Image: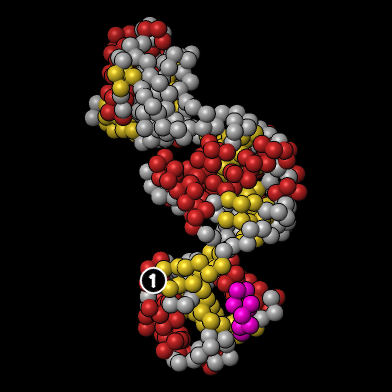
Amino acid sequence: MYEIAINMRYLSVDNFGRNYTFKKAENFSVSINQVWVKGLLSAAACADMRPEKWPFQAASTGLGNIVTADRTGQARNSHGLRRAQQASLLNARIGVTSVRRLLASLVVVSCGILAACQSDVDGIAKNVKTNDVKPPSTEVEETFGESGAEITLLLQKGPSGLYEGASRDIRDGSALSVGELGGNQAFVKVVDVTGGAAGVPAAVAAAKARNSALLVSYVQPAVAAAIAAMPSDQRPPLINLGAPVPATAGNVYNLVSDEVDSALEGVRASFASGHKKVMVYAQKDLPQAGEMQIANAIRAAGGTFVGIARYDLTDAAAADAVQKSRPLLQAADTVLILGRTAIATTVEGAIKAGGQGNLNFIGTSAWPPQAYAEPTAKGTLIAMVEPEGASLIADRYQRHYKRPLSTDAAYAYDAVAIASGIIRTKGPEGLNAQNLTSKVGFRGVTGLFRLTPTGLVERRLSLYAISGGKLNVLAAAPASF
């Protein structure tokens, strides 16, 4: 079988007035001697399409901007990330425009072949324009890397049939990581579990049958919970990048830190100065579980949880929440303000306007950068991962994927980095609970962290103080646990 290996992003081909979109398909192959699109091509039946007869030859590419082919049909590199250096068509450099012309030419040639031969192979009609031509990319699974142990990435596609938003970022962060750190000893296989929790057993069983060393998931909570609930001897270990799930079945690790983690680290810093009576302000959508986690952690650290006041996302509502909570506030010496908008600084401003002194103010990593510029935010402490860690890969991510590095992509990079590091040093069998929960932890682009047998993540954060409209380092994250 002769093949043209195709690696591309959303390339549209207009054929007889119809637009066909080929979705990104890593190492996707167009079989020259098979009917690969209904009513489009049956070269083996009618023409000599041996590779030596093809009028072109192209060098390999990994990023997806250029369709590539060679005489062996294996146009790919080791990890699907490196940019193509060159490609040739009739000894000329070609890009996506030339690729469109190439595919359009193949379409026209194949249709001419069909007309000449009157072929009925595989139900091909005599008039191609009457056929419902559909691209096969929805059935293609992406793989990044070529050899070694499998790291299975479980994702769900969006309504368009593509990986969108955070799922796309996680896929690309994983691909970048295995390309840089896999050392040809690990590869990432992307598996679509859009079908929901019902499809989980089959997908996980298939991964185990392929001797997958690790599952990494970013899926809806119910789907992640279904994966985590499977007995640990029936699946590989799971690193979950979505909302936290119970780890009662064992070998389940929630890697992502959230606003609550940042809040508690900031509170601990305040405790060091002797301020241990904490009043909390939070958006109304803070889950009850988050409130309980904060209250329990404050008490466990020897502090006093004074109470919590919730606010709506308007200045007036925030000021009203402060006014109604003043009796509780009088008993506090530390104010923790959670929030994802600049309204958090309205809360702080209303408290400061009341004239109560000797208060420490703690913000969180969820505060947007524009909040730092608000005068009322001056002096607020925020614990968060050092941005310098993510900057180590930010430029390369931007270069490869033409968009800024996101937090989701950074977490995915670290998840695959954990697996790659253990596989390189201890082999695939080294991805077990003992090594994954090493007390030494791991240092990644999201900082220093360690996984725990309870399924939670412990992370060392740096402490910042807001001053001059920006974050200023007050205490760097500890170098070790």
- The residue lying toward the viewer, choosing from 347 and 220, is 347
Q: Residue at x 36, y 32 (%)?
A: 65
| Residue where numbered disc 1 is placed | 469
Q: Secondary structure at mark 1?
A: loop
Instruction: Give the left or right position of residue 37, taking residue 230 as reference.
Output: left
Residue 71 location, x and y as percent? 44, 13
> Which one is nearer the viewer's eye here, 65 or 216?
65
Q: Residue at x 59, y 33 (%)?
A: 183
How far across and down, in percent of the image, does residue 192 sit? Answer: 53, 41
Tell me what residue is drawn at x 55 percent, y 32 percent.
145
Q: Is residue 393 magenta?
A: no
Quarter residue 377 falls in = bottom left
Name the side, left or right, on which 278 lies relative to 400: right
Residue numbers of the magenta segment:
268-277
Q: Is residue 272 magenta?
A: yes
Q: Amino acid at mark 1?
A: Gly
Q: Quadrant of the C terminus?
A: bottom right
* Residue 66 visible within the image: yes
Percent x, y for residue 242?
56, 55
Question: Please, which colouring scheme is shown?
Answer: secondary structure
Q: Is residue 196 visible?
A: no
Marker count (numbered): 1
